[in-house]
Amino acid sequence: MASKAGSDGKEAINEQVIANTYANMRTEMNQLYTKITELEMEVSEHSLVIGAIEPLDPSRRCYRMIGGVLVERTIKEVLPAVKRNKEGLQEVIARMHEALERKKKEITEFELKYKIRIRKADNDSEEGGKKEGTAQGVLVGPAGQ
């Protein structure tokens, strides 16, 4: 009897370790998603800047933030640097997508190994009521009134 109780305790500990490991893996995956989204937004900003300054005269002055310091340069100096930064960000995003795919595969293998299934809450009726009551919107009247 004592050995059975001891093995139940060990199983509970192992289950807890597995659950914690799985939660950590999911957290890492979510962090990768967040970072990729953040970097994609930076690429989008770089594209906007490139689109705005490319048609302008290359000798025209422009300002660029470098390490928290605003510096004055010409478009001819800034445009290649912004394009290089955008390309570098795209390379980083590609590597992060690869890391994300590896993490997804690792999580899938972990789920299969330990037969992990995600439970979904069956609180549809409660959520429906909450969604109506907590919906927030902004009502804007016509301009000038």
Image: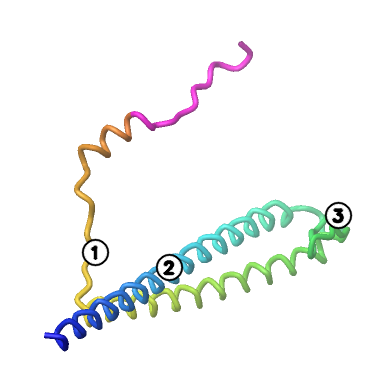
Front tag of 3 and 1: 1
Q: Give the range drawn in magenta.
A: 133-145
Front tag of 3 and 2: 2
Residue most toward the front? 2
Closer-to-camera residue (122/74) = 122
Q: Which amino acid does label 2 sit on?
A: Thr
Q: Position of residue 76 (x, y in %)?
A: 81, 64
How busy is the neighbourhood of tag 1: few (under 14 within 10 Å), some, or many (20 plus)? Answer: few
Q: Is residue 123 above or below residue 133?
A: below
Q: Where is residue 38 in the image (x, y as percent from the top left)?
A: 56, 60
Name the residue that disc number 1 marks. Answer: 118
Name the residue that disc number 2 marks. Answer: 27
Q: How far apart are marks 2 and 1 (CA)?
A: 15 Å
Q: Where is residue 28 in the image (x, y as percent from the top left)?
A: 45, 71
| Residue at image coords 53%, 65% | 35
| Residue at image coords 83%, 54% | 62
The label number, if any, that marks residue 60 in the structure image: 3
Closer-to-camera residue (5/20) = 5
Give the mark nearest the N terminus, 2 or 1. Answer: 2
Q: Position of residue 97 (x, y in %)?
A: 45, 73
Q: Which amino acid does label 1 sit on?
A: Ile
